[in-house]
Image (cartoon, helix red, strand yellow):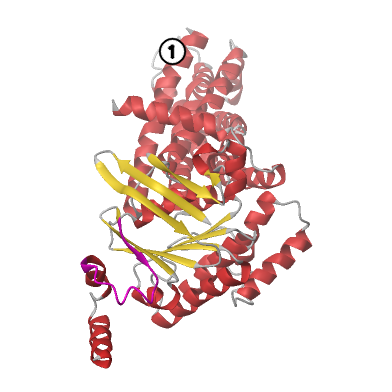
C-alpha cells in the first residue's frame, strides 16, 4: 500500500513541477547552475570509470578467447557492443544515481529540514518548479555524458587491448566497425534520456517529502540511491525488450 | 486584520486544533502562546496557508482563504511575510540575495531599484556592511534581522513570526522583539507571533492568545495576563522562579 501511495505522490509531484513556472531570467540562471553542478561536475568520475571499464571489458574478452579460430577483432567488437549497449548508458546511470542523486536528495532535504522550502511556499513560489524543474532540464544534457562515456570506454578498451598485447590496433579497429548497427547508439541515447529523468526526479521526491532532521537527510539519500537504481534496472529491462526485443 | 472562525485541524487520529476563533488586529503585535505541543505551530501554518484546515474559515481583511482561486491565493501570499524559527535563509545566497529574492521573483523593478529597497530594509533592521556575507558567516541575531528584512521587503500586510527569538541571548531577543513591534506599528502590519517566551509576552504582547491542548484557553493583553485567575495560564506564566518572584513582589506591593 505504501508503494502505491508513493507512486501516487511521485506522479502528483511531477505534475506540480510543471505548474506555475518561475520567471525565465531566474530559471535560466538556475538551469545553468544545475548543468554545472550535475553534468559538468560529474565528468571527471564518468571519464575515469568509463576508461577502466572499457579496458576491463577488452581484457576479459581477450582472456576468454582460447580458440585460435576465433578472430582477434572480437575484442574490439565485444568492447564496442558492451560499452554502447550497457556500460555507457546503464552503468554510468547507476554511478550518477549515487553521485548526483545523493546530492539532489541531500540538498533538497536540507532545505526541507531548515524550512527553506516552507519559506519559498509562503512567498508564493512554486517550490517544486523552482527546485526540481532546473534539475530535470539540466539532466537532459546527460546523453552528452553518455556519448563521452562511450568514446572513453572504447578508447580504454583500445589502450588495454593494444598496449596489453591482446590485439593489434588494426584488429581492434576492425572489430569496432564490424556489423555496426547505428540504432544501437539511438537505443542507448533513448535509455539515457529516460534514466536522466529518473535520476533528476526520484532523488528530488525523496528529498522534498522527507521528514525529520539531519539524520533523516542521510537516510533519505541512501533510500533515494537504492530506489533510483532499482527503477533504472527495471526500466532498462523494459526498454531493452521494447526497443531491441 | 485576520479573523479566524472555528478552526479545526487533525493529522490522522490526532486532533490538533479544536475550534479556535479569534481576531488579529492591524498595527498590533498578536502573540500565540502555549506549551510545546499545544498546537501553536499548526495554527500559524494554517494562517500561512501551508496547512489546509479541516473546518472553519480564515479571513484576511474580508478575503476568506478557502474561497479564493489559485491566482488570488498567490497574490495574498505575496502580502505575507514570515520569519521562521531557524530564519530559513537560503544558504546559497548572500544576505543581499536573500532579501532581494522576493523582489526578483515578483516585481519588475530594475536591479538598482531592488538594491535601493534591499539597502533600505537592511538599514531599517540595523544591519549594515553584511550585504555580501553568506548566512553561514553571520550570527544568529543577524540571521533573524535578515529574515525580518526579507519578510518586510515586499511591504507585507501580514507578518508572521515563529518563535523569532529562540536561540538568542536575552538582550538580542529583546532587540528583535522590539524591532518587530516597531515595524508593526510603523508600517501598520497585522503581526502574529508564535512564542513561548515570557519576556516577549511582557515586552510586546499587545494581544495574547493562550492555547492549551488545541483549545483557545485564554485571550487578553500583556497587562491582563498577570492578573488572570485562569489556572492553566498562571501555571504557564509562573513556571519559572523569576516570574514566581515577580508575582510575589507584585502581590506584596499591592497589599
Which residue is more in the foreground, A75 or B17? Answer: B17
Q: Name the residue that disc number 1 marks.
A: A68
B44 to the left or right of B255: right
Q: Quadrant of the C terminus of chain B?
A: bottom left
Q: Which chain letter goes with mark 1?
A: A
| Magenta stretch, residue numbers | B216-231
Of residue B241 and residue A229, the one placed in the foreground of this image is B241
Q: Nearer the viewer, residue B129 or B243?
A: B243
Q: Does residue B53 appear anywhere in the picture? A: no
The image quarter in which residue B188 lies: bottom right
Along the horizontal axis of the image, is B199 left or right of A164? left
Q: Quadrant of residue A151?
A: top right
- Assess disc 1: are there few (<14), some (14-19) or many (≥20) residues with their C-alpha within 10 Å of its C-alpha: few
Name the residue located 52 percent from the left edge and 39 percent from the top edge. A46
Q: What secondary structure is found at the residue carrying circle 1?
A: loop
User: Is B223 within the magenta?
Assistant: yes
Residue in the picture at 60% in, 13% down: A183
| Numbered label tally | 1
Magenta residues, dominant SS class: loop
**In the image, residue B115 above or below residue B201:** above
Q: Position of residue A104 (x, y in %)?
A: 48, 44
User: Against B241, is B112 above or below?
Assistant: above
Q: Residue furthest front?
A: B255
Picture quadrant of residue A3:
top left
Measured as percent of width and height from the top left, residue A188 is found at: 55, 21
The answer to whether residue A85 is visible is yes
Q: Position of residue B60 (x, y in %)?
A: 54, 50
Q: Residue at x 44, y 42 (%)?
A: A208
Does B55 lie within the magenta span? no
Amino acid at each position: 500500500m505504501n508503494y502505491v501511495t508513493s507512486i501516487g505522490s511521485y506522479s502528483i509531484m511531477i505534475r506540480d513541477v510543471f505548474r506555475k513556472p518561475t520567471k525565465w531570467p531566474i530559471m535560466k540562471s538556475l538551469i545553468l547552475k544545475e548543468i554545472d553542478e550535475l553534468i559538468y561536475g560529474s565528468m571527471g568520475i564518468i571519464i575515469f570509470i568509463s576508461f577502466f571499464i572499457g579496458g576491463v571489458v577488452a581484457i576479459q574478452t581477450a582472456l576468454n578467447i582460447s580458440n585460435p579460430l576465433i578472430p582477434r577483432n572480437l575484442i574490439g567488437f565485444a568492447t564496442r557492443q558492451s560499452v554502447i549497449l550497457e556500460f555507457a548508458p546503464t552503468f554510468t546511470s547507476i554511478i550518477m544515481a549515487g553521485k548526483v542523486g545523493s546530492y539532489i536528495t541531500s540538498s533538497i532535504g536540507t532545505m526541507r529540514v531548515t524550512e527553506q522550502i516552507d519559506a519559498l511556499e509562503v512567498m508564493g513560489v512554486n517550490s517544486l518548479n523552482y527546485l526540481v524543474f532546473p534539475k530535470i532540464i539540466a539532466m537532459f544534457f546527460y546523453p552528452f555524458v553518455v556519448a563521452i562515456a562511450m568514446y572513453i570506454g572504447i578508447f580504454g578498451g583500445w589502450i588495454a587491448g593494444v598496449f596489453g598485447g591482446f590485439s593489434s590496433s588494426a584488429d581492434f579497429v576492425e572489430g569496432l566497425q564490424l556489423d555496426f548497427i547505428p540504432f544501437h547508439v539511438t537505443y542507448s541515447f533513448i535509455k539515457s534520456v529516460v534514466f536522466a529523468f529518473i535520476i533528476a526526479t526520484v532523488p528530488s521526491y525523496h528529498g522534498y517529502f522527507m521528514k525529520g532532521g539531519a539524520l533523516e537527510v542521510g537516510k533519505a539519500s541512501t533510500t533515494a540511491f537504492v530506489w533510483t537504481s532499482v527503477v533504472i534496472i527495471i526500466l532498462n529491462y523494459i526498454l531493452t525488450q521494447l526497443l531491441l526485443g | 486584520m485576520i479573523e479566524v472562525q472555528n478552526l479545526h485541524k487533525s493529522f490522522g487520529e490526532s486532533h490538533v486544533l479544536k475550534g479556535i476563533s479569534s481576531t488579529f488586529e492591524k498595527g498590533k503585535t498578536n502573540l500565540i502562546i502555549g506549551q510545546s505541543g499545544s498546537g501553536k505551530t499548526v495554527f500559524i501554518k494554517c494562517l500561512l496557508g501551508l496547512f489546509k484546515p479541516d473546518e472553519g474559515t480564515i479571513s484576511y481583511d474580508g478575503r476568506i482563504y478557502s474561497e479564493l482561486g489559485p491566482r488570488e491565493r498567490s497574490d495574498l501570499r505575496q502580502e505575507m511575510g514570515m520569519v521562521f524559527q531557524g530564519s530559513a535563509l537560503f544558504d546559497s545566497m548572500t544576505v543581499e540575495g536573500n532579501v532581494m529574492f522576493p523582489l526578483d521573483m515578483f516585481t519588475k523593478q530594475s536591479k538598482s531599484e531592488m538594491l535601493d529597497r534591499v539597502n533600505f530594509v537592511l538599514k531599517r533592521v540595523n544591519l549594515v556592511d553584511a550585504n555580501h556575507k553568506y548566512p553561514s558567516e553571520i550570527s544568529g541575531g543577524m540571521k533573524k534581522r535578515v529574515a525580518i528584512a526579507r519578510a518586510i521587503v515586499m511591504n507585507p500586510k501580514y507578518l508572521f513570526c515563529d518563535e523569532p527569538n529562540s536561540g538568542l541571548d536575552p538582550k538580542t531577543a529583546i532587540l528583535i522583539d522590539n524591532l518587530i513591534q516597531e515595524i508593526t506599528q510603523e508600517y501598520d502590519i497585522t503581526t502574529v507571533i508564535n512564542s513561548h517566551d515570557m519576556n516577549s509576552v511582557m515586552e510586546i504582547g499587545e494581544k495574547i492568545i493562550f492555547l492549551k491542548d488545541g483549545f483557545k484557553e485564554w485571550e487578553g493583553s500583556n497587562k491582563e495576563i498577570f492578573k488572570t485567575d485562569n489556572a492553566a495560564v498562571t501555571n504557564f506564566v509562573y513556571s519559572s522562579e523569576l516570574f514566581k518572584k515577580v508575582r510575589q513582589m507584585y502581590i506584596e506591593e499591592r497589599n
